[in-house]
Amino acid sequence: MNDSSFQAQLGEPKEDMLDWPRAPQEAARVIQSIASKTLWLVIAGLLIIGSIAGATGGFFDKDSFFHHLLRDIGIAFFVGALITAIYEMYARVRFETMLMNSFLNAVIADWSRQDIWNALKSQIIEKTVMRENFRLAICLQPDKRLLPGQMLLKMQVSYHLLGLRSESMRVKIEHFFDWHFKIAQHKLPCFNGVRVGDKDIPLESDAFNEQGEFMYWVTVPAKDKGMVPVTTSRQEVIYFPGVNCFVLNEITKGLEICLNAIPDDVSAFVTVRAHPNLKYRELKLESADDRIKIDDIVLFPGQIVELLFQPKEQVAQAAQEPSRVNPAQ
């Protein structure tokens, strides 16, 4: 199955899809410009009337009725001008936001479908936090507690949690296991430790439940105002040869994957799905250059880091067969 994108052309080429919303968009901008200029003229008129009223009141005695009346009228017009100016700025920002949302909804609905656009907004655009400098360190080793054909996979996951809003927010951090391989007598899979900010979370706390989920509320600073470092250590049981999939549940920028330990007769490969340049990249202990480190990569919720472990003999045999296009086949 080929998951790569393609373009299909049927009949005559379409005109640029961005052209069709241009007329209503320009009309809206013209109307908004006229309304804005009229409003500023009204503000200027209020200021002029207020100034005239205040100056006229100065001609009367300070204790007279007309002096106080004209002074109050002048203050009222100045306050009215101030409130109108504040409302104009608020209305302008709100109008621009509504116009952009309307424009995006129209374009995306024409390119795709409205329900897909709604799902995209809820899963990506409306996200309040993201992960940065995501690092995954792995260690694969045999374990006497496990059955033949099983191995113990240790992983340390660390990243920085950053806010995407203009104010600080409380968000819930979530990490979880795949429980298809549970060995209750050895308490596997399990977390070995979790650190959020400068606080170590006790493993017996309510943040961990029996379903292998870690859920913890934390306050994330406003956008560009700081970050919260998060580190988790875990152990899982995998089949060997076999695959372990790590699912990302937040927008993630910056990826580093390194190998800390592995048996001499085992090869490890990494695939990031779906990313065209990260397919079956081999990790090796003897060379630091073989780690995966990409600072400018952006991954989205639902993308998967797939770890494939195979005997080196099988990898060498596959490399000699022309029909084998990758280690997984």
Image: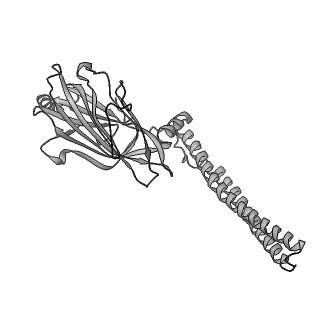
Compared across the picture, whether 77 is left or right of 10 comes to right
Who is closer to the viewer here, 256 or 232? 232
Among the 4 quarters of the image, the one containing residue 131: top left
Colour option used: one colour
Q: Is residue 325 visible?
A: no
Who is closer to the viewer here, 178 or 300? 178
Q: Position of residue 100 (x, y in %)?
A: 59, 49
Furthest toward the front, the residue is 63
Q: Residue at x 38, y 30 (%)?
A: 206
Compared across the picture, whether 27 is left or right of 307 comes to right
Image quarter in which the N terminus is found: top left
In the rendered image of this protein, does residue 191 appear above or below residue 53?
Answer: above
Who is closer to the viewer here, 171 or 91? 171
Q: Is residue 82 visible?
A: yes
Q: Residue at x 23, y 29 (%)?
A: 328
Who is closer to the viewer here, 95 or 211? 211
